[in-house]
Amino acid sequence: MKGTVIILDGSPSVGKSTISREIQEIAEDPYFYFSIDDFMKKLPSRWIEFTDDLNYVNGLGYQLTSDEEGKPMIRFKAGPTGERFILGYINAIKGISDAGNPVIADAIITDPKWLEWLTDRFEGYPLFLIGLRAPLSVLENREKKRYEPPGMTRGRFDEVYGFEKPFQLEIDTSRTSPQKAAQEILRLVKNNR
């Protein structure tokens, strides 16, 4: 039997990690939390590039720039090696589920192709795609408190929320506590088993 898969998608600083840990605390089942940030630490650092030109990125690339108002933005791009990394992450989540384990994973889906990979690989699985959102101003305040590089949220915001995704549930984390969000997600899972 395949384990339940909960994917939390949203911008940096939206609360994916906090809500994942809350689900682990209150769920009856032993959910594995499989974080993209932890998975990324397995990638050799030379494949994580800070560059002025994202056109030549092979791994995972970050570019410090600014918007029309001069506010800092950090743009992201996955090159060929970076896309294999993302596909590997998706397949690793699938492997955890295939062993019968319930799993929570986080995502920052900024490319429709990645969404297609995810939905194709999990066809027939108990998959719950949850959208997390909050106003940009709230996310940037959280970013400051987390000591994240300024502009990470602004740089990904439009890409994350710029196209439609087949969410079973959307939660505004500026209005919903992590505990309440976890309860809503687990209620959705329970009612759709």
Image: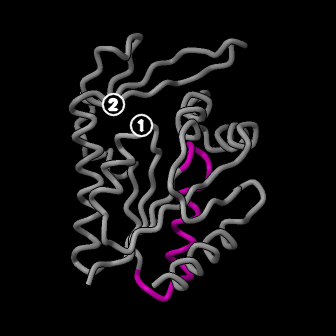
User: Comparing marks 2 and 1, which lies closer to the viewer?
Assistant: 1
From what the image shows, is residue 59 above or below residue 14?
above
Name the image quarter holding residue 86: top left
- Answer with left or right where residue 130 lies relative to residue 53: right
Q: Is residue 144 left or right of residue 5?
A: right
Give the mark nearest the N terminus, 2 or 1. Answer: 2
Whole-Å distance between the Cαs marked 2 and 1?
Answer: 10 Å
Q: Position of residue 154 (x, y in %)?
A: 62, 30
Under mark 2, the amino acid is Ala
Furthest residue toward right:
175
Read off the residue under disc 1: 111
Secondary structure of the residue carrying tag 2 is strand
Q: Position of residue 120 (x, y in %)?
A: 29, 56
Image quarter in which the N terminus is found: bottom left
Label 1: state its secondary structure: loop
For the magenta stretch, what is the residue range?
A: 10-30
Quadrant in which the C terminus is drawn: bottom left
Q: Image height check: is 59 above or below 165?
A: above
Residue 19 within the magenta-colored segment of the rendering: yes
Q: Position of residue 92 (x, y in %)?
A: 24, 59
Residue furthest bottom in the image: 28
Placement of 4 over or under 148, stated as above or below: below
144 and 185: which is toward the camera: 185
Which residue is found at the position 62% from the left and 44% from the top? 146
Where residue 77 sits: x, y (%)? 38, 27
Dot 2 and dot 1 residues touching (CB under 8 Å): yes
Residue that appears at 69% across and 37% down: 140
Query: Pointer 2: what residue?
Result: 78
The colour scheme of the drawn protein is: one colour
Query: Which label belongs to residue 137?
Result: none
Q: Name the amino acid type tagged 1.
A: Asp
Of the pair 62 and 113, the residue shown nearer to us: 113
